[in-house]
Image (cartoon, rainbow, N blue to C red):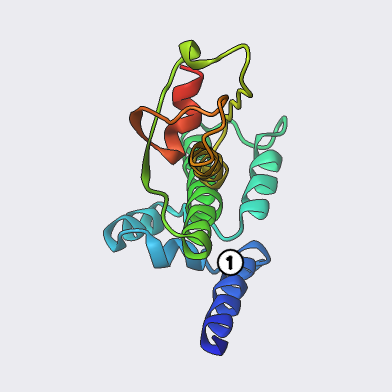
């Protein structure tokens, strides 16, 4: 167990170091997870992000009146921000959630507005937090096992991560 705690601490320190990086060194999480050939292209373009907060602040300064109107620079900055968000936000958060709670598995459920019932507790989730959808699906399954009249067993295949999107389609 001690080794797991030590490893968890090291993973957290790497994640935190990407957010506190004020050097010219690119984000370590990106290097660990992105394909090497893509990293090489991004490096040649000069768009490897260092720290999501820093990249956002620099983009705000760059786009302020009189600072930069060059469309190529603006597009490269947009690409850098996409990498910072994708690898410093979405990818990192998903990886850590999968490490802590396991990779989400497909579940069966009903989707669309037609599944809402007046005499039931209806939960609609929207966003990019796969863990929340996973836990809603898990508890729906647990409560189904109790045979409560207002709990219905899900009936169509969808991933927990896309459950929220399907419910509001």
Residue drawn at x 27%, y 59% as measured from the top left: 37
Residue 138 x/y as whole percent = 50, 45
Q: Residue furthest bottom?
A: 2
Q: What residue would you read off at disc 1? A: 15
Is residue 163 shown left or right of residue 8? Answer: left
- The N terminus: image quadrant: bottom right
Q: Residues within 10 Å of mark 1 (few under 14, many from 20)?
A: some
Residue 122 x/y as whole percent = 60, 23
Query: Is 111 located above or below residue 7 in the figure?
Result: above
Q: How many marks?
A: 1
Of residue 8 and residue 111, the one placed in the foreground of this image is: 111
Q: Residue furthest left?
A: 37
Residue drawn at x 57%, y 29% as measured from the top left: 126
Of residue 123 and residue 79, the one placed in the foreground of this image is: 123
Query: Is 148 located above or below residue 43 in the figure?
Result: above
- Name which quarter of the figure residue 102 lies in: bottom left
Residue 55 x/y as whole percent = 62, 50
Query: Is 40 located above or below residue 144 in the figure?
Result: below
- Name which quarter of the figure residue 50 lies in: bottom right
Residue drawn at x 57%, y 43% as measured from the top left: 132
Q: Secondary structure at mark 1?
A: helix
Of residue 148 and residue 12, the one placed in the foreground of this image is: 148
Residue 17 x/y as whole percent = 62, 70
Of residue 11 and residue 40, the one placed in the foreground of this image is: 11
């Amino acid at each position: 167990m001690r080794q797991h705690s030590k490893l968890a601490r090291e993973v957290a320190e790497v994640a935190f170091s990407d957010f506190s990086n004020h050097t010219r060194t690119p984000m370590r999480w990106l290097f660990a997870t992105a394909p090497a050939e893509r990293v090489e292209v991004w490096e040649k373009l000069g768009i490897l992000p260092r720290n999501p907060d820093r990249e956002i602040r620099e983009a705000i300064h760059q786009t302020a009146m009189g600072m930069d109107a060059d469309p190529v620079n603006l597009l490269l900055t947009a690409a850098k921000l996409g990498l910072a968000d994708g690898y410093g936000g979405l990818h990192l958060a998903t990886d850590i959630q999968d490490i802590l709670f396991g990779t989400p598995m497909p579940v069966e459920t009903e989707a669309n507005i037609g599944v809402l019932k007046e005499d039931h507790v209806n939960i609609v989730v929207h966003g990019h937090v796969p863990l929340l959808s996973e836990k809603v699906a898990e508890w729906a399954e647990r409560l189904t096992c109790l045979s409560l009249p207002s709990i219905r067993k899900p009936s169509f295949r969808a991933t927990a991560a896309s459950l929220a999107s399907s419910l509001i389609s």
